[in-house]
Image (cartoon, helix red, strand yellow):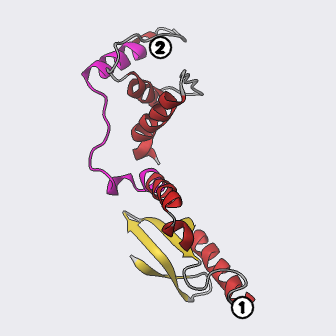
């Protein structure tokens, strides 16, 4: 919602450029430079007050993303802005992006049960071998949910690393 109202710590009525509130989770988007947010264009007192307002937004428990007006207009930056906004929403308010939660399939559940069984017998190491396309990356993400401690996930190519990161984020999304 544009110009979302909020009350700062001094009781003053303020506005967020764009505010998203869903299930008591709050995301604020500030666009600087469209009219007067830039230092030098406005008096120092007004510039300082705008910075203070953005700190008040953070102190009020909002997750804040800041963009410049030129970033929103420039084609190269626009995709970065969209990515960062999508990432924040997926991390903080995933339920507004999708109604579908990622759940293990039958094969993944079978393997997860086997891993649990062998861990209960004291095994500390293991290897899972499955054909291409059966969900090994998602399987590893599901397994990390139940495994305490640190996890080492190794890939051999950057494109696979990116796909793996996205898979882990989809599995972990409800936890953020």
Q: Position of residue 45 (x, y in %)?
A: 72, 90
Q: Quadrant of the N terminus?
A: bottom left
Q: Quadrant of residue 102?
A: top left
Is 97 magenta? The answer is: yes
Name the dominant secondary structure of the magenta segment. Answer: helix
Give the residue at mark 1: 43
**In this orientation, which residue lies closer to the viewer: 102 or 34?**
34
Identify the residue at horizontal 68%, vertical 86% (top origin).
Answer: 41
Asked if residue 39 is among those painted magenta in the image, a careful observer would answer no
**Residue behind mark 2:** 119
Instruction: Indicate whether 14 appears above or below 58.
Output: below
Which residue is found at the position 57% from the left and 26% from the top? 151
- The answer to whether residue 27 is above or below residue 174 is below
| Residue 127 seen | yes
Q: Secondary structure at mark 1?
A: loop
Neighbourhood count class around disc 1 (C-alpha, 10 Å): few under 14, some 14–19, many 20 upward: few
CA separation, marks 1 and 2? 64 Å
Q: Is residue 19 left or right of residue 39?
A: left
Taking the spot 44% from the left edge, 29% from the top edge, the residue there is: 141
**x, y percentage for residue 170?**
40, 40
In which image quadrant can residue 171 be found? top left
**Residue 52 drawn at (x, y percent):** 66, 79
Q: Which residues are magenta?
A: 88-116
Q: Nearer the viewer, residue 23 or 2?
A: 2
Q: Residue 96: percent from the left, percent from the top? A: 33, 57
Q: Residue 60: in sight, yes or no?
A: no
- Against 12, is 115 above or below? above
Q: Earlier in the sequence, mark 1 or mark 2?
A: 1
Q: Residues within 10 Å of mark 2 (few under 14, many from 20)?
A: some
């Amino acid at each position: 919602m544009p110009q979302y109202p909020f009350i700062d710590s001094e009781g003053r009525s303020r506005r967020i450029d764009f505010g998203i509130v869903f299930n008591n989770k709050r995301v604020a988007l500030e666009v600087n430079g469209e009219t007067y947010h830039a230092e030098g264009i406005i008096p120092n007192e007004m510039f300082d007050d705008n910075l203070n307002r953005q700190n008040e937004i953070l102190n009020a428990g909002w997750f804040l993303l800041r963009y410049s007006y030129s970033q929103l207009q420039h084609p190269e930056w626009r995709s970065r802005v969209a990515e960062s906004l999508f990432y924040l929403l997926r991390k903080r308010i995933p339920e507004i992006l999708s109604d579908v939660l990622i759940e293990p399939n039958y094969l993944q559940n079978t393997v997860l049960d086997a891993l649990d069984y062998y861990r209960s017998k004291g095994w500390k190491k293991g290897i899972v071998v499955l054909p291409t396309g059966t969900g090994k990356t998602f399987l590893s993400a599901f397994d990390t949910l139940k495994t305490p401690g640190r996890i080492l996930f190794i890939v051999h190519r950057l494109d696979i690393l990116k796909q793996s990161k996205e898979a882990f984020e989809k599995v972990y999304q409800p936890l953020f």
